[in-house]
Amino acid sequence: MPNPRGPSPARAALSGTASFSPAPSIHANDETHPILHAGRVAVVTGAAAGIGAAAARAFAELGMKVALADVPAREPQLAALGKELEGIAGEGNILVVPTDVTDLKQVQSFRDKVYETWHEVGVLLNNAGIGSFDARRGTSWENLDAWHGILNVNLFGVINVQQTFVPSMLHQENPAMVINTGSKQGITNPPGHAAYNASKAAVKSLTESLAHELRTNHPSVTAHLFVPGWTHTGIGGAKPGQEKPAGAWTSEETVRPSLPPSFHHPSLPLT
């Protein structure tokens, strides 16, 4: 079956202006990026699998401390990832906190545990999202429950995390960044995925607003929209053990271009 979403862009985009050009603040030429370096803290939601897990591995390889969150139903996968990353980053440098981003109290508890443990956040990867093919197919005038479910996670989950973490990040001395995971579908709007497309278009708009507000009032914290193309993950309909279709990217290939040039990891091949 041909990919209904079209071919992937030439590379994933991570930009404060939501374009397909990487922001200079991400692609530093220095050996040491002001944020993406050893000792800083990365927070990843939707971390149990896919892009979230790939990003968490990459942050750990950079020597960062990593806080992992995903829904409580995925606690076994999250715990397994945490143990794996402790082997990379060392004991005490990984924090596992099962968290449903649609529950504001759980998000606030997650933030409190991160700050109680490490007292800062360098990178907030606001990545939790859903996109079941069954739920997002159909028309714009039916399946209201699916609309609520998708928007509650993909939009209001992002808002919950953003509203909870950003005020604390603004009071830090060190620079920091917020990365919201969008989607090419939030820009190209392919037919047949109305709720998912709308949720990711809203995340694009939200991130652009946040970037402007931070640039104007708190330039030490920046906001960026991460725009993956067709990635072979569960959110894109991939099944366990299923071979990656031609034209799709792995999660690692999607994450890799957004890391500093000094990052080299044999499990993340350049493409």
Image (cartoon, grey):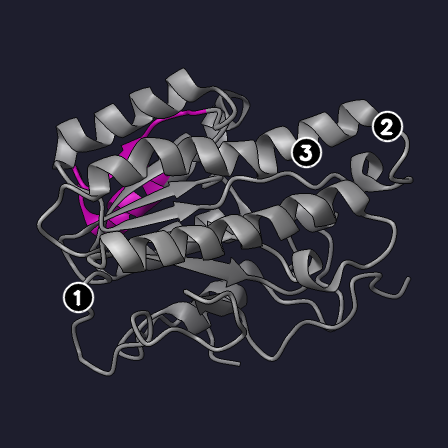
Name the residue carrying label 1.
34
The magenta segment: 82-99
In the depicted structure, whether residue 254 falls above or below residue 181: below
Do the CB atoms of the residues marked 3 and 2 lie less than 8 Å apart? no
| Residue furthest to the front | 216
Q: Work out whether mark 2 precedes mark 1 in sequence or the reverse, and give the earlier one.
A: 1
Which quadrant of the view contains residue 151? Answer: top right
In the depicted structure, whether residue 71 falls above or below residue 173: above
User: In terms of secondary structure, where does tag 2 sit?
Assistant: loop
Q: Position of residue 79 (x, y in %)?
A: 39, 31
Q: Residue at x 18, y 80 (%)?
A: 30
| Residue furthest to the top | 105
Name the residue carrying label 2.
143
Name the residue carrying label 3.
150
Which quadrant of the view contains residue 147? Answer: top right
Q: Is 77 on the left or on the right of 233, as rendered?
A: left
Q: Position of residue 23 (x, y in %)?
A: 38, 73
Q: Work out whether mark 1 precedes mark 3 in sequence or the reverse, and give the earlier one.
A: 1
Q: Residue at x 61, y 29 (%)?
A: 152
The answer to whether residue 12 of the structure is visible from this angle is yes
Q: Out of 214 and 158, give the one closest to the viewer.
A: 214
Q: Out of 74 and 29, give the one closest to the viewer.
A: 29
The answer to whether residue 240 of the structure is visible from this angle is no
Would you call the spot at circle 2 few (<14 residues within 10 Å), some (14-19), or many (20 or more)?
Answer: some
